[in-house]
Amino acid sequence: MRLIILVVTLIAGSALAAAPKRVSFEFANADVHSVLRIFSEVGRFNLVTSEAVSGKVTLSLRNVPWDVAMNAVLAAKGLGFERRDNIVRVAPLSQLADEAAMRARIEEAKFLAAPLKTTLIPVNYANAAELAQQVKGTLSSRGTVSVDTRTNTLIIRDVE
């Protein structure tokens, strides 16, 4: 397990303060965890890696933005990242996709389980039946709108 670090230089970004730092790296058979730790130091973020992140990487980069370099390393190893505040979590793309799908299913289940709220909106100076079509476009998939023509009122049922 030999790690050769020939050059690690940080070159200040251009005049733009928001521009990412430019880096130059020369690594041969470096552990992916070590390379990611260097990126976390350069990018000033906290790093969490999955157990499935492993392997070696060889790279030779000259004067590239650190985030572009990190994305290249992640892509070469089939990895992705998820950022929450100042914490970056690195895991295989398949694991991140599975977690995103699970979160989407949970959100969908919450949406389907949410109670419907009924709102009565009396309409003045217009016909409620004509407004109902416009209101339908703003409702969720579970929402309904009906009209009480006797009182010229919109009856809207939708999730809160």
Image (spheres, rainbow, N blue to C red):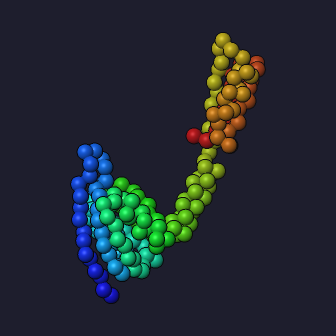
Q: Nearer the viewer, residue 56 or 123?
A: 56
Where residue 89 sits: x, y (%)? 40, 65
Q: Residue at x 61, y 53 (%)?
A: 108
Where residue 64 sits: x, y (%)? 33, 60
Q: Residue at x 24, y 71 (%)?
A: 7
Q: Quadrant of the C terminus?
A: top right
Where residue 17 sits: x, y (%)? 26, 46
Q: How many marks?
A: 0
Q: Quadrant of the N terminus?
A: bottom left
Residue 143 in sight in this render: yes
**Residue farthest to the right, as pictured:** 149
Where residue 95 sits: x, y (%)? 52, 69
Residue 57 image-quadrant placement: bottom left
Residue 143 image-quadrant placement: top right
Depicted 154 relative to depicted 73: above or below: above
Q: Residue at x 58, y 57 (%)?
A: 104
Q: Nearer the viewer, residue 79 or 83?
A: 79
Depicted 139 relative to depicted 7: above or below: above
Q: Nearer the viewer, residue 108 or 42?
A: 42
Residue 9 image-quadrant placement: bottom left
**Residue farthest to the top, as pictured:** 125
Q: Nearer the viewer, residue 55 or 138?
A: 55
